[in-house]
Amino acid sequence: MKHLVLILVIVLLALTACKKNELKKPTDVAISIDINRNPSSEGHLSFHDGYIRLASFSVEGVRQEGADVELSKEFEQGNLTYFSSSSPINNLDIDIPQGNYTDLDIAFNTFDDNDETTIRVEGLYTNQSNQTYPIIFEFASSESFSINSEADDGGSIIILDKNISSSVLIKLDPVYWFDIVSYNLFDNASLIEVNGSMTIVVDENTNEDIYDLVVDRLDEQTSSVFSN
């Protein structure tokens, strides 16, 4: 009887160790950052291009089983990432352990050490007379983003499996950033010639009244969705 109990204990310990090892195995997750490319509800704004310069990227997660996850990546020279829904971020080799996540948070900071633009978005503004102007927004400071991720099926659990490739799409929302800007401010904005087109440039030195409104909303309405 004692031998049987001992064997059962050994088997249980082996199974527990095996399960813990399984929960440590990394998953193949492609991480992309894009922008909301849908036009505004009034149809006067849309954005189609740009980039973000990353200083750091981190993931924190809580699983139904297994230890909590805390992972981070630093980019000492900054990591220039062009907005795309299909091109994963270069050099972002964070191995997220498999498991069923009840909470999975993503955070990142912009890189501003070289006095370069850290966020740039390009789009179009159409006024009430149906005239369209290019619009360029440039931000050159540090900004922190923190997002609670969701599953693409709308469920509360994000499932990561080492045998199934996953992706996460992070979306910034410049349409929301600019939604606070009135037609009057847009129509009275200074225009600068860029590549032969009169353009609404918004940065800390140009159209500052618009810039101040927009930068207050940069870290809002950002989403992060995991898909298998």
Image (cartoon, grey):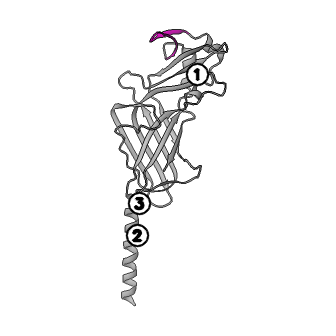
Residues under numbered marks 1 and 2 in contact, where contact means CB atoms less than 8 Å apart:
no
User: How far from the left and from the top, in percent, is residue 63?
Assistant: 49, 56
Name the secondary structure under disc 1.
helix
- At x 41%, y 54%, the residue is 97
Label drawn at residue 23: 3
Mark 1 closeness class: few <14, some 14–19, many ≥20 residues within 10 Å:
some
| Residue annotated with mark 2 | 16
Describe residue 18's horizontal placement relative to residue 149 as left or right: left
Gap in angstroms between the C-alphas marked 1 and 3: 45 Å
The relative height of residue 166 versus residue 109 in the rendered view (above or below) is: below
Q: Type of residue at label 1? A: Leu
Please tell me which of labels 2 and 3 falls first in the chain: 2
Gap in angstroms between the C-alphas marked 1 and 2: 54 Å
Describe residue 66's horizontal placement relative to residue 157 as left or right: left
In this orientation, which residue lies closer to the viewer: 135 or 129? 129
Please tell me which of labels 1 and 2 falls first in the chain: 2
| Span colored in magenta | 190-203
The image shows a total of numbered marks equal to: 3
